[in-house]
Amino acid sequence: MYQEEYKRWMAADLEDADLMPELTKIEGNDDEIKDRFAVALKFGTAGLRGVLGAGTNRMNIYTVRKANMGFAKYVANLPEGKERGVAISYDNRHMSYRFAIESAKILAKFGIKSYIMESLRPTPELSFAVRYLKCADGIMITASHNPKEYNGYKVYDDTGCQLIPEWGDIVVDYVNEIDDELEIEQISDEEAYPFITWVGEEVDEAYY
């Protein structure tokens, strides 16, 4: 099964050009293929966290999109969730900015507003921004204390706290409904940007 999944990724027209060399390099290495494709990266109450790279058990734009599809469905069903929107911040790990943009564009597909920090901001400020901007939820792209080869995707409620298990389970159910992360179509920048607002200095000053 995992070999078939590997072949499917190999045959796909991947948008992230860095992933194909990884897949080519592990050709014939059953242990490596199994590690990357035997399971999907698990979405928990805190979100996703894992090693960056190609595969269903890695952090990449496809697994992040899948997580965001589930989270977007959750936000869209909250009272005034689309209008209140989602605050998004990110750290300086590899792919953090890209994952933040991918997150906002998936939200935009559902008509959900997002407020993205204009540059790097820490997790505590993201929690504050959710409350300050009166957002329905928040997303922080970070892997916290994990080694440099990791990244993560964490979700927060309207109080700036991570989702309680009851709400997290709803998101997990939505995520698990999605079978194929490679088939998730991303919208264009032009379609997404009417739903995206860049924030920074005003939030910084209020936070200080």
Image: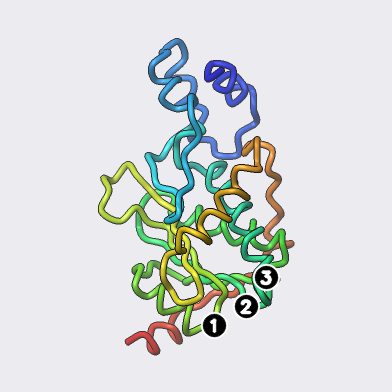
Which circle marks residue 197 in the picture?
A: none
- State which quadrant residue 135 falls in: bottom right
Q: Quadrant of the N terminus?
A: top right
What is the x, y in percent for residue 19? 50, 32
Callout 1 touching callout 2 (CB < 8 Å): yes
Instruction: Give the Cα separation between the discs numbered 1 and 2.
Output: 7 Å
Foreground residue among 41 and 15: 41
Instruction: Give the Cα separation between the discs numbered 1 and 3.
Output: 16 Å
Tell me if residue 185 comes above or below residue 4 in the rendering.
Answer: below
Foreground residue among 97 and 106: 106
Q: Which residue is found at the position 47% from the left and 41% from the top? A: 42
Q: Secondary structure at mark 1?
A: loop
Q: Earlier in the sequence, mark 3 or mark 2?
A: 2
Q: Which residue is found at the position 71% from the left and 53% from the top? A: 187
The amino acid pointed to by label 2 is Arg
Tell me if residue 66 comes above or below residue 206 in the rendering.
Answer: above
Q: Which residue is mark 2?
A: 84
The amino acid pointed to by label 3 is Phe
Q: Which residue is mark 1?
A: 134
Q: Which residue is found at the position 41% from the left and 25% from the top? A: 35
Q: Earlier in the sequence, mark 1 or mark 2?
A: 2
The amino acid pointed to by label 1 is Lys
What is the x, y in percent for residue 76? 68, 65
Q: Which residue is mark 3?
A: 195
Q: Secondary structure at mark 3?
A: helix
Q: How is the image coloured?
A: rainbow
